[in-house]
Image (cartoon, rainbow, N blue to C red):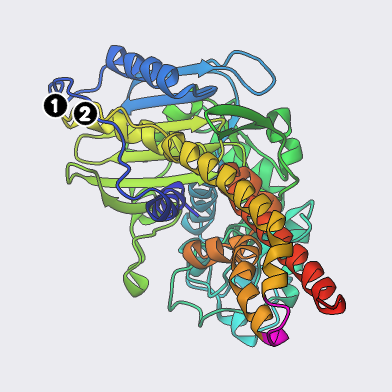
Amino acid sequence: MTVRKVAAVAGLVGVLLTTGMTAASSSVKAPEAGELSATAIDAYMRNYVERTRLPGALVAVTKGDQVVHVAGYGHTAGGEAIGEDTPMPLASVSKSFTALAVLHLADQRRISLDAPVRKYLPEFTMADPRAAKITVRELLQQTSGMSDQTFPELTLPAPDTLQDAVAMLRTAPLTTEPGTRMAYHNPNYAVAARLVEVVAGVPFAEYMASTVFRPLGMTATKTVNTTEDLPGRGAGYVRAYGRLIERSHPKWFLNGSFGVVSTADDLAKWLIAQNGGGRVFPSTTVKTAQTPSGVDGSTYGMGWYAGKSAGGAPELQHTGWLLSHNSAQTLLPTSRYGIAVVTNTGMISGDDAVLITDGLIDILEGRPDAQAVPFTTTADPWLAGLTLLNLALGAWGSYRARRWARRRAGRPLWRALVRLIPYVLPIVFFFGLTDLFGLLLNRVGTLEQGTYVWLALYVWAATGALAAAAVIVSRLIHTVRARRTPG
């Protein structure tokens, strides 16, 4: 799931809660379009960090084969200052690295992209005979037919190795016929990574280091299996009610799909290679990864989405998120700029990587600084007020439950019970939060993960459910007492 999709859902929920609420804008005169300088980037970042209280970030900007700016800002959850050589997790930006590793095997004719995965990876089996037809290309283009709807991987116990991650798919059916629809699903890339290590005959991390990272000069970059292997075990921050809350990260399996850890220095080298600089990988290989599949209108290639910037320029991008970090890598082929941003804030509560990227593109394309802030910065105060209202209404309804029951003591019991039905809705909404996000984002998570995703929304929904339950219970108790007591 991309950060932009998550932000879109946040916007939808926010409109329902806060109709008419808009982000503040600035009347600052637009800078001259066409160039991004190190000075402009640094000034923008310092302003962004100050106005949003962003705890920490990495930024790398390149143009063609030149580095424009690499830097770190703020601090890690462990309190260490972030510099251009500080390692941070790239989340789903990692998919473009895995795709390149697979394409390198294809260039060497060790695999064929259009051959069935099972030809190279016999252990890849699913509870669906159609899985035998899934090709390597379909894994990379996310058109395999697998999805969170039939294999909700983020709700399951995390495996420890790529081999275990592939084995877990044995009981999973497919959602659609392979090659007919794009569905973003992390296990596609876990299978692709396992294929790499089986065909290459070495662990995936070792293959990535020797074939991708070191040839590109990315000596501080690696790929890991689980969040427990991340720097600081993946700890970061979530925003809630204008405050930053440090959170540890639950154990997730990462490798292949979102397990790369890198630095601003190394990300600059990666952007240069992806923008046509350097000759480590053939330009045709890089272009193959960046070209959309077109399957059912999909704009997804192999670890890249194709789109347009706010100014209408062609744009290639991939975003990523953990519960405690988010990231974005962007290429602008026309101007040959590359931008990579990683921050230690989680999704929705900290969609900072995309906001920073968009702000830098605004400078490049000559638009004024929108003074953008994470959505929750403006939504959380409203949710705080609604949360207090939930508690007040729950207390008032419970206090008046005795009078409510007495007024209905002489009426049929079913009529009193019908009057309680509306109070069930907040309870259903709370326990259906994960289903709501799953429906809108095609991803399935847990209620506990919701406390990372948008804590203020979770608390609002939880207090609504609690208040409704209190009213229901108190009215039922007084209803029973009123009908047992004559007069």
Q: Which residue is mark 2?
A: 364
Badge 1 element: loop
How many marks do you count on the picture?
A: 2
- In the image, residue 45 lies at what x, y percent? 38, 19
Q: Residue at x 67, y 73 (%)?
A: 407
Pick out the residue farthest to the right: 484
Q: Please, is residue 444 above or below residue 34 in the view?
A: below
Q: CA distance from mark 1 to mark 2?
A: 5 Å
Q: Amino acid at mark 1?
A: Ala
**Foreground residue among 64 and 4:** 4
Badge 2 element: helix
Q: Residue at x 85, y 78 (%)?
A: 486
For the C terminus, give its image quadrant.
Answer: bottom right
Quadrant of the rendered image containing residue 433: bottom right
- In the image, residue 47 lies at what x, y percent? 36, 17
Per the rendered image, the range of residues in magenta is: 408-414
Quadrant of the rendered image containing residue 241: top right
Going by the image, does 320 lie left or right of 434? left
Q: Residue at x 34, y 61 (%)?
A: 299
Q: Amino acid at mark 2?
A: Leu
Question: Which mark, by number, is residue 33?
Answer: 1
- Asked if residue 113 shows in the view, the reply is no
Q: Residue at x 78, y 55 (%)?
A: 159
- Asked if residue 184 shows in the view, the reply is yes
Query: Is residue 261 inside the magenta stretch?
Result: no
- In the image, residue 231 lies at what x, y percent? 69, 29
Q: Are marks 1 and 2 in contact (CB under 8 Å)?
A: yes
Going by the image, does 444 lie left or right of 401? left
